[in-house]
Structures are given as C-alpha cells and as structure tokens.
Image (spheres, rainbow, N blue to C red):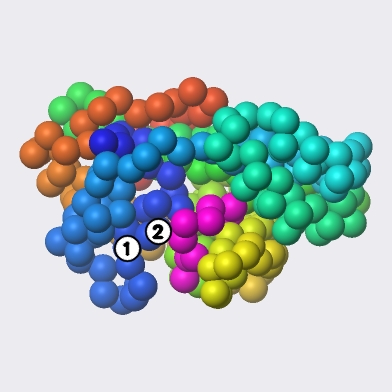
C-alpha cells in the first residue's frame, strides 16, 4: 500500500476530482482510497526522460540521443514509456535551447500528524533561462495512467509557483509539459501550458484546498491506512517559514 506522508502534487490534484467548486473531505477521502491506496503492481519512474529533457533543453543531445538514453537507462519496465515521452516532447525542448538551473524534486511540508510531517511532492526539476532571466519553471506531466482536467493542472502549477518561483526565480513563468495520454488513450499527446494562460491560485486558495486534503489524509491515517514512511530519496524537504501552510 502506498504511503500518505509524501504524495505527488499530481495525485493530490486527482483526489480533488473534476469540479473545483465541489470539493469535500469525504469525496477526497474516497478518491484517495480508490486511486492511491488500492494495491498496485510495481511501477517505474520518469527520471530517465526528465534527465534527458534537461539535456535536450540545454542543446547538448538530440532527440534521437535522448530516446536512446531512455531505452538503456532505468527500470526496464519503463524504458519504452520514457522513450515515448521523449518522442512526444523532444522537438519542443530541442527547438527552445536554454540555460537550465536544476531545482530537483521538492517535498513541501503541509501538516503534522502524531509527530510526523505530511508532505506534497513537486517535480519541477529545473528552471530554464533565456535572455539572462529565469524564464520558465518546468513541470513535467508525463503520466500515461491519467489525463488531468484543466483546473487540476492549474492547481499543480500554482503550488509549484507558490513554493519555487521565489528569489532569483521570482519572475519565472510556469511551463507545464503535458506528454500524457491522448483523448483516445492510444498514444501520447504533447501540449505546453503556460502560467500566463492559466487561472493560477493564490496562496490562500492553495491552503484552503490543502486543508481539505489533509483532513481526508488524517482520516485514513487514523485507521492505519497509508502510514508507511514516505520515500524521500532524491527530494529536498521544504518547511515553509511558519512551520505549516495553515
């Protein structure tokens, strides 16, 4: 069973459901059980395609080289899928050469439960720079098992911008690179979404949504569901200045 002490922001967005005006703790609780806590087979991650994407934006490898890297790196179960991601997004990256500053994966503390911190994970691995300014905070949307609704993408990008577009990166726009399933689910579709075209949420709106999420998580933890330790390997843990978002 998956643990609830570190959950990817893309999953949290799915738990909220299709209608941002009708989000309740019971509904989020049920979606966590259905979409996340049910036993699943062993999976793979998208780290090879994310690594290759960075080098594509830097212009130091070609899309063909990036695909070859994905076909020889990482969990064999995911090699074809990671190569398919590069086939979808590679030309966009290769035609927008930029300097890239790595951020890595971030685990943001959002609450505490019985002395343990609850986190939301954000995979925004780098900022790409053009014309000497931080231009885009890049967020990969590479999952093939789900097709997020527009407002769910807005939420993920809002959370990333709120936590990561600060200091030297304050003026960076969000670039969400969708390379998930096409409408018929038979292939991957590529689209680039930008924060300037989204309805980004304020910090208060983000906190209100996460409060509902945390209440649903606590209901599961109280029953012993999802109590496994979070897998923080590769993540930098961020504790907001006030100790919690709430």
Residue shown at 30% from the left, 54% from the top: 35
Of the numbered discs in the image, which one, if any, rests on residue 13?
A: 2
- Magenta part of the protein: which range? 141-149
Q: Nearer the viewer, residue 95 or 173?
A: 95
What is the quadrant of residue 208 in the picture? bottom left
Which element is circle 1 on? helix
Q: CA distance from mark 1 to mark 2?
A: 5 Å
Q: Is residue 111 visible?
A: no
Q: Please check the rendered image and state whether residue 47 is part of the magenta-colored stretch, yes or no.
A: no
* Quarter of the N terminus within the rendering: top left
What is the quadrant of residue 218 in the picture? top left
Tag 1–tag 2 contact (CB < 8 Å):
yes
Q: Please check the rendered image and state whether residue 146 is part of the magenta-colored stretch, yes or no.
A: yes
Residue 37 lies, with reference to residue 237, above or below; the image says below
Which element is circle 2 on? helix
Q: Which residue is mark 1?
A: 16
């Amino acid at each position: 069973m998956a643990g609830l002490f570190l959950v990817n922001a893309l999953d949290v967005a799915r738990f909220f459901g299709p209608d941002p005006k009708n989000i309740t703790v019971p509904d989020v609780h049920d979606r966590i059980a259905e979409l996340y806590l049910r036993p699943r087979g062993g999976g793979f991650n998208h780290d090879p395609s994310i690594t290759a994407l960075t080098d594509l934006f830097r212009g130091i490898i070609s899309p063909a080289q990036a695909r070859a890297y994905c076909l020889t790196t990482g969990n064999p179960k995911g090699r074809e899928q990671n190569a398919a991601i590069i086939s979808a997004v590679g030309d966009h990256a290769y035609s927008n050469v930029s300097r890239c500053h790595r951020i890595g994966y971030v685990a943001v503390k959002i609450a505490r439960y019985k002395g343990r911190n609850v986190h939301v994970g954000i995979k925004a691995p780098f900022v790409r720079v053009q014309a000497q300014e931080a231009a885009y905070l890049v967020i990969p949307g590479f999952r093939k098992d789900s097709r997020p609704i527009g407002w769910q993408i807005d939420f993920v990008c809002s959370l990333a911008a709120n936590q990561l577009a600060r200091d030297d990166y304050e003026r960076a726009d969000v670039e969400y690179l969708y390379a998930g399933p096409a409408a018929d689910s038979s292939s991957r579709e590529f689209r680039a979404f930008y924060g300037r075209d989204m309805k980004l949420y304020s910090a208060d709106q983000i906190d209100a949504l996460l409060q509902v999420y945390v209440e649903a998580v606590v209901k599961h933890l109280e029953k012993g569901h999802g109590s496994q330790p979070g897998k923080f390997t590769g993540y930098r843990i961020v504790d907001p200045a006030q100790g919690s978002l709430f």
